[in-house]
Amino acid sequence: MKCVNKIDWSKWDHLLGKDTDRSLAKDIGCAVITVSLRRKKLGISAFIRQFFLDWVKYEHLLGTDIDRRIAKKIGCVTNRVTSKRKELGIPSYTAKNPIIDWEKLDHFAGTKTDPEVAKIIGCSTRTVYDRRIVLNIDAKQKCKINDWAKWDHLLGTDTDYKLAKKIGCASATVSKRRKKLGIPDFVKPQKKIDWIKYEHLLGTNTDNKIAEIIGYSTTCIRRKRNALNIPPFLPKSEFINWKKWDHLLGTKSDPKIAKIIKCSPKSVYNRRKKLNIAPYRGGQQGPSC
């Protein structure tokens, strides 16, 4: 790309935000970041490319369902649907929905699962759930356990989830039964660490690495190390004799120089900034703003 030494912004300011920074930078003949910085300096919002929507095709859908679902159907963001609906003065789907006459429908609660009842009534599952809670009606379970005598001895010996899988019911059913019988929740026994064997490792490597060696959690290693007032392991920072390498700064990209020196690109970047050396731009001087 051919770069100019100084940009006459009076020619270009009126175009900022009318197209992408990349497109404008191409027209001006400068770096994208130069355009971006100028636009931000003037407080101009970035250009957002939006595809054209033929609302004539979709206006009949507005307000017939929640905006999120209509947006999904059309293939755009929810905000565009909401904005268009408000622009046309169409009330939202939830606002138009009549109040549910629960007196006629309460008999459904608990007789079927909440999603099934919601489908019959034509409302959300959450609405049915909230109503069922108000009426203190238990949810319909996919399976009913008649003989707990077979399973009571297992309660608290494993997680409710695993027992529910074994019994063939919801974990909430197992949890409710366990609490009813006053049985405490299952707590997985913790493996005891023989710290006499491993204390000498603390602080000699990262907590993560030591956790891998011992086969325990990083949190446990960190707590033990802190309890013994052992400082965390900090890898030695790379020592670079910059006198040997300073002449390369700005002559190649930072990652390429880092590869030659065998250090991180960040180290090269920091050194170059410290010496106030401009970044490498393929042999061309970048434009000044």
Image (cartoon, rainbow, N blue to C red):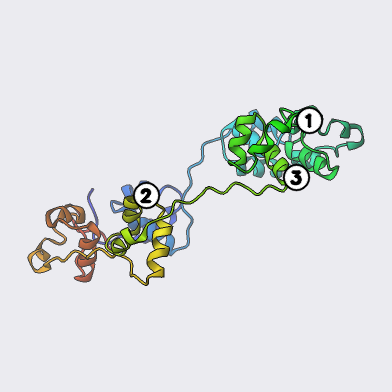
The residue positioned farthest toward the right in the image shown? 103
What label sits on residue 180 in the rendered view? 3
86 to 274, vertically: above or below = above
What residue type is disc 2 on? Gly
Q: Nearer the viewer, residue 259 or 1?
A: 259
Q: Nearer the viewer, residue 182 or 287?
A: 182
Residue 212 screen position, x and y as percent: 34, 50
Between the C-alphas of marks 2 and 1, the distance is 49 Å
Q: Earlier in the sequence, mark 2 or mark 1?
A: 1
Q: Residue placed at 80% from the left, 43% from the top?
A: 133
Residue 205 location, quadrant: bottom left
Q: Is residue 95 left or right of residue 247?
A: right
Q: Earlier in the sequence, mark 2 or mark 3?
A: 3
Q: Earlier in the sequence, mark 3 or mark 1?
A: 1
What residue type is disc 3 on? Lys
Q: Is the C terminus in the top left, top right, bottom left or bottom right quadrant?
A: bottom left
181 to 243, vertically: above or below = above
Residue 140 visible in image: yes
Residue depth check, mark 2 versus mark 1: number of the one nearer the observer: 2
Would you name the residue on which mark 2 appears? 215
Between the C-alphas of marks 3 and 1, the distance is 28 Å
What label sits on residue 117 in the rendered view? 1
Residue 289 visible in image: no
Residue 93 location, quadrant: top right
Residue depth check, mark 3 versus mark 1: number of the one nearer the observer: 3
- Mark 3: few/some/many CA within 10 Å (<14, 14-19, 20+): few
